[in-house]
Image (cartoon, rainbow, N blue to C red):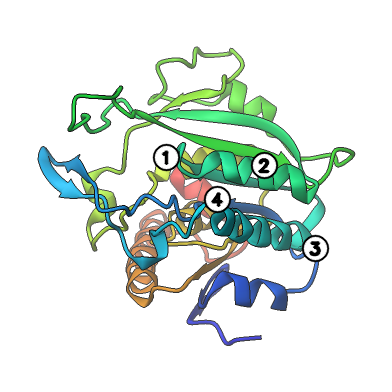
Amino acid sequence: MSSPYYKKPNFTLYLADSLQLLPKFPSESFDMVFADPPYHLSNGGFTVHAGRRASVNKGEWDVSRGIDKDFKFDLEWITECRRLLKPNGTIWISGTYHSIYTCGFALQKAGYHILNDIAWYKPNASPNLSGRYFTASHETLIWARKDKSAKHYFNYKYMREGGWPNDFLKKPGKQMRSVWAIGTPKTIEKTFGKHPTQKPIDLLKRIVLASTKKGDKILDPFTGSSTTGLAAYMYGRDFVGIDNEKKYLDLSIDRFEELARNLAGKRRQLRLPSVPSITHETLLR
């Protein structure tokens, strides 16, 4: 097993290729996987960013190798993640139409049971540059359990009764629906830089709270700037993230250390002891 690139209590990062590192973890190690795999969008085209024309190219890791090789890649890591999930564990995968259907088919081929597909609606999505298509204003998330007979965890009460101020489709006391209105990452979330496919912290908070319990272990095999890890740490979960780009792991570390400092500052301000009974979740209320 490779040594971690960075390790703190409940937050561990590995600099590695996931396909090479995942087989080295023991089976049934994780309660939940969140994966934001390559979307295969880097094709030389253009998009709009901050009101300006920008290249869609994100890096070599995002280039499509053709439908057969892209599917082989997705099936391989998805199958390995199934081995790593505990019997009642679940996986979340995010993507656009460029990648999500391949991942959905791979999930079924690997033996998972799909629970939901979530439409993450972006109220502040960038406009379409060409004027020849509908404006892409959502991404899809698939939530699946390890197999059909598993008894997955779902925090139904909190998803129904919790306060969700960002979501105009969620009425107090009503069931949460499968369309989530959450804006793209705020400026403050990019203080130290940004990942080209960075997810908003509010999205990952909801996922972590919906499908894991305090003390659960979460894996992100394509961690990027580790938004998953920040949400996991905030709510008392244990996190392991993997990425093959050092610059994004360094960005993850900057983000994590700022969060840890802020939480420590709140403890001092409230004169709370640093003991397990006083959780990060308590400080965030």
> Which residue is farthest left?
52
List x then y, in percent, for residue 103: 60, 46
Q: Secondary structure at mark 1?
A: helix
Specify the amino acid type for callout 3.
Answer: Glu
Q: Answer left or right for 111 relative to 105.
A: right
The foreground one among 211 and 90 is 90
Q: Which residue is mark 3?
A: 28
Which mark identifies residue 145? none
Residue 17 sits above or below residue 40 on the image? below
Q: Earlier in the sequence, mark 1 or mark 2?
A: 2
Q: Which mark is residue 202?
A: 1
Residue at which label 4 appears: 235
Q: Position of residue 192 (x, y in %)?
A: 24, 63
Mark 4 → mark 2, Cα distance in angstroms:
32 Å
- Report the Cα–Cα distance between label 1 and label 2: 28 Å
Distance, label 2 to label 3, CA atoms, is 23 Å
For marks 4 and 3, give the CA distance: 22 Å
- Nearer mark to the viewer, of 4 and 3: 3
- Amino acid marked by disc 1: Asp
Q: Residue at x 58, y 20 (%)?
A: 176
Residue type at mark 2 is Phe
Compare marks 2 and 3 and give the one earlier in the sequence.
3
The local crowd at label 4, few if under 14, some if 14 to 19, many if 20 or more residues have their Cα within 10 Å, is many
Classify the position of the N terminus by image quarter.
bottom right
Tell me: 78 left or right of 150: left
Labels 1 & 2 near each other (Cβ < 8 A): no
Looking at the picture, how far across and down is residue 173, in whole percent? 58, 13
- Going by the numbered disc 4, the residue's amino acid type is Tyr
The residue at which mark 2 appears reads as 105
Callout 4 secondary element? loop
